[in-house]
Amino acid sequence: MTEALDAGPFFHGTTADLRAGDLLTAGFRSNYRPEVVMNHVYFTALRDGAGLAAELAAELAAGVGTPRVYAVEPTGPFENDPNVTDKKFPGNPTRSYRSTEPLRVVAEVTDWTRLTPEALQAWRDRLAVLRADPRAEIIN
């Protein structure tokens, strides 16, 4: 894997109810493309970026589950997330990463910024367009 740009701390957003010491692993279906089984687990160095991922996970699960953010630590090598790095944003301004190795949950984080109703609606609209576009791919 390529050299990462960040030393953390790192965060993961999800609807899963986890505890310190739990491991997040690859091999689950994508929230964005349920037909795709993910080869990586994704994380970010931005607490509110993980909050956005948590909100979107809840939205894509039709409101089932509570958006949660966890402080995590990689257990192995990781790389910049190519789904946003250079493909959409030059460099890695979103400080987004992925790993084929598990992430260990350190603690739940509760002081992240929730989306406003207007921002959540804007993301619903973006996700509807993304899911309807057969050309939209996930670099897995």
Image (cartoon, grey):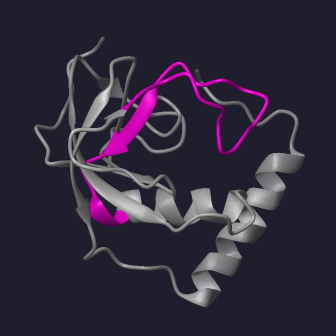
Q: Quadrant of the N terminus?
A: top left
Label tally:
0
Percent of width and height locating residue 50 = 38, 57
Above-or-below relation of 27 to 16: above
Q: Is residue 62 above or below residue 130?
A: below
Is residue 42 within the magenta segment?
yes
Outermost residue on the bottom side: it is: 117
Residue at point 30% right, 46% down? 95
Q: Give the farthest residue toward the top.
A: 1
Side of 81 relative to 122 (left or right)? left
- Please state the extent of the stretch shown in magenta in the rendering: 24-48
- Kindly indicate the quadrant of the structure image that contains residue 43: top left
The one of 85 and 39 positioned closer to us in this rendering: 39
Judge by depth and name the residue closer to the eye, 71 or 79.
71
Image position of 61 (left or right of 39): right
Q: Is residue 91 magenta?
A: no
Write the residue at 58% across / 25% down.
38
Quarter occupied by residue 122: bottom right
Query: Please, which residue is most extreme toward the left here?
Result: 7
Is residue 102 positioned above or below 86 on the image? above
Image location of residue 55, percent across then percent down: 54, 66
Where residue 71 appears, as percent x and y from the top left, is: 22, 52
Residue at image coords 63%, 88%: 118
From the top left corner, tell me how far across and down residue 27 is, in percent. Answer: 55, 22
In this rendered view, identify the residue nearer to me: 98 or 66: 66
> Which residue does the image show at 59% across and 56% down from the upper left?
57
Specify the principal SS of the magenta part: loop
Q: Image quadrant of residue 112?
A: bottom left
Q: Nearer the viewer, residue 62 or 43?
A: 62
